[in-house]
Image (cartoon, grey):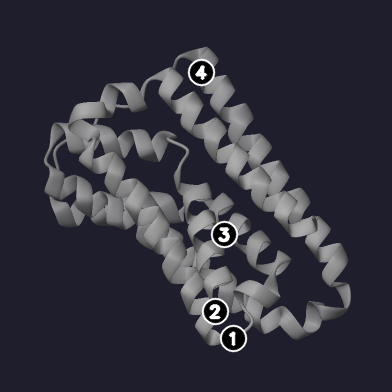
């Protein structure tokens, strides 16, 4: 149970930490509207991450018996996928940093609309389900061994994502420019890339 909780927390932070387009939008939205709207938007992002973590766990549980004979090769394949994701995050961050892109303008909106819109935007990101699926299938015995550990993983992943998104929302008015500046985006993305890489190494070491 503890291992599943820890895995969920690390996985949640690994997918949430990079401040890309969605994170920048969240900070800018909070800065221009209100904390209530920002919190709703943050929970929308975290909900999407939680749904994808749940989907990955359910799929991992169903496939557990089928993949047992190929556990070792699957661990290596999962590690490779995670390293590829980490590399993509880092390369994308470096490219954005060089281009000095700025977050798009946002308009005032209601809390409910902010939740729905950020949920929809995040759900449309296919990399999230690939990320969670790689983690779950790479370590089924820890994450999806039984309903209790699976639930612990999903809840921890949601909590980690929610805590980071809420931090962005709460700091939107004060830290918005610093976090969403080209240098801020680069730093958070590279930190996330390092976390994901550590997860990959953990699968095979």
| Nearer to us in this view, 20 or 167 | 167
Measured in 3D between alpha carbons, the distance from the residue under mark 4 to the one under mark 2, in whole angstroms, is 39 Å
For label 4, the residue is: 97
Measured in 3D between alpha carbons, the distance from the residue under mark 2 to the one under mark 3, in whole angstroms, is 19 Å
Q: Which of the two discs, 4 and 2, labels the residue nearer the N terminus?
A: 4
Q: Quadrant of residue 56?
A: bottom right
Helix, strand, or loop for circle 2?
helix
For label 3, the residue is: 129
Q: Dot 3: within a 10 Å radius of its alpha carbon, few (fewer than 14), some, or many (20 or more) residues?
A: many
Measured in 3D between alpha carbons, the distance from the residue under mark 2 to the one under mark 1, in whole angstroms, is 6 Å
Q: Does the rendering let one see residue 166? A: yes
- Residue shown at 60% from the left, 38% from the top: 193
- Residue shown at 51% from the left, 18% from the top: 97
Q: Which of the two discs, 3 and 4, labels the residue nearer the N terminus?
A: 4
Q: Position of residue 30 (x, y in %)?
A: 19, 38
Vertical order, 148 against 122 (above or below): below
Q: Which mark's residue is nearer the viewer, 4 or 2?
A: 2
- Label disc, if present, on residue 149 of the rendered structure: 2
């Amino acid at each position: 149970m503890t291992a599943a909780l820890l895995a969920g927390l690390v996985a949640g932070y690994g997918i949430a930490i990079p401040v890309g387009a969605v994170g920048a939008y969240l900070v800018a939205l909070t800065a221009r509207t209100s904390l209530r709207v920002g919190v709703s938007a943050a929970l929308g992002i975290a909900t999407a991450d939680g749904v994808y973590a749940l989907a990955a766990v359910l799929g991992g549980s169903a496939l557990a018996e089928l993949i047992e004979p190929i556990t070792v090769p699957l661990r290596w394949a999962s590690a490779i996928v995670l390293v590829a994701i980490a590399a993509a995050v880092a390369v994308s961050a470096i490219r954005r940093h060089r281009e000095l892109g700025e977050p798009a303008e946002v308009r005032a909106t209601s809390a409910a609309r902010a939740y729905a819109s950020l949920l929809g935007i995040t759900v449309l990101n296919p990399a999230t389900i690939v990320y969670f699926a790689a983690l779950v299938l790479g370590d089924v015995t820890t994450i999806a061994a039984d309903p209790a550990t699976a639930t612990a993983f999903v809840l921890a992943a949601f909590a980690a994502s929610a805590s980071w998104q809420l931090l962005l929302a709460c700091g939107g008015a004060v830290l918005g420019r610093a976090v969403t500046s080209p240098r801020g985006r680069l730093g958070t993305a590279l930190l996330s890339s390092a976390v994901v890489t550590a997860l990959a190494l953990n699968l095979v070491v």
